[in-house]
Image (spheres, rainbow, N blue to C red):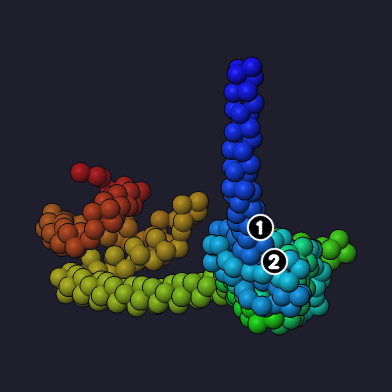
Amino acid sequence: MKHKTQQVQNESGTEETKKAAFPWVKIVIAIALVIVVGYFGFTCEVREGSCAVILRFGAPRAEITEAGLYFKLPWPFETVTVYDNRLQYLESNHLETTTKDNRNIIIQSYALWSIDDPLQFHNSIGSQEKVESYINDQIFSATNSVLGSYELKSLLSLEKEEIRSDEIQEKIYNAVKSTCEASYGISVNDISILRISLPDTNLESVFAQMRADRQKDIDTIIAEAQKDADKIISDADTEYSQIISGAEIEASEIYAKTEAEVAKIYAEAQAANMELYQFLKELDTIVASVSQDTTLVVTANSYPFNILLDYSDILTDESDETVVKDLNYILAQLPEDDRNALIDAIYELIEQAGGTRS
């Protein structure tokens, strides 16, 4: 009996202890719930690489550009819209446009962009899914405007100095950058031409133009080469004329000196022995009247061949010595080849005239 009474008392004490501990459990749970509700209801977390706009009843109240934990009122009083503000890559659609010289081309560009002003971005665009269409529109507008001031050769040319693609890209970039920053809160870091192509209908005309440009360059090169060739030929002709003229003058001077020397020799021969001089003159007449292929049939006593007989008749021992001395003097004045030829001719004539060769 006592054992049962003690057991009942123990159970009663346990129940009282449980009843005493239960309010503390409620308090802990309530505090935990308040913390959770307070954390999720009154704060918002913005992570690195993101930005956000806090909206109160749908109207922007504040913008957040730095990562961290921020206070806000719970829904439905305030909501938070988060955007990715990391650097984004965009390839534009293909744009067919016209250059200054009315050439159609197809251009595709790429852009690097990020959100710079979250509040302005939210008010102007409001959705990250729509931003590409806005940037595309700005790229198309700027490209059309800029290319309208340039000819096709500024983008496609065989001459490096004619290509101005860097200048064109710079103008497109500045136009898009200023508009996106002012109107959409978007920072554009780069815009460049990704690829350029030509419509099929324009390919042949462009190739024809390129061939015409090449032919024009070829014609210019040929004309310059012909001009240089004509100048070289003219200079060569002038130099040739000068050389010929100088040679003729020099030849005339040499000929004049030779004639003077011959005349001097003849004068000295005439002064030394008139008969020998007369003989040589008549011998020149004979030599001049015949050639290698000439055959003459004449009598020995007919002129001028009678001089051979006449001269042989007057040869005496004394006259032979005089003639030989005079002839040696004359021969010594002649070149070796002429001297040998003259000696052979004289001996041949003397032998034909009946003389003897010693």
Give amino acid for label 2.
Pro
Tell me: 312 left or right of 100. left
Percent x, y of residue 345: 32, 52
**What residue would you read off at disc 1?**
37
Could you tell me which secondary element the residue under label 2 belongs to?
loop
The answer to whether residue 245 is left or right of residue 279 is right
Expressed as whole percent of the image width and height from the top left, the position of residue 76 reads 76, 68
The circle drawn on residue 293 is none
Residue 90 in view of the camera: yes
Q: Nearer the viewer, residue 294 or 242?
A: 242
Residue found 12% across the figure and 56% down from its top: 321
Tell me if residue 208 can be seen: no
Instruction: Give SS at disc 1.
Output: helix
Q: Which residue is mark 2?
A: 74
Residue contact between numbered discs 1 and 2, judged by CB atoms under 8 Å: yes
- Nearer the N terminus, badge 1 or badge 2? 1
* 307 over 216 or under it: above or below: above
Query: Residue 117's quadrant in the figure?
Result: bottom right
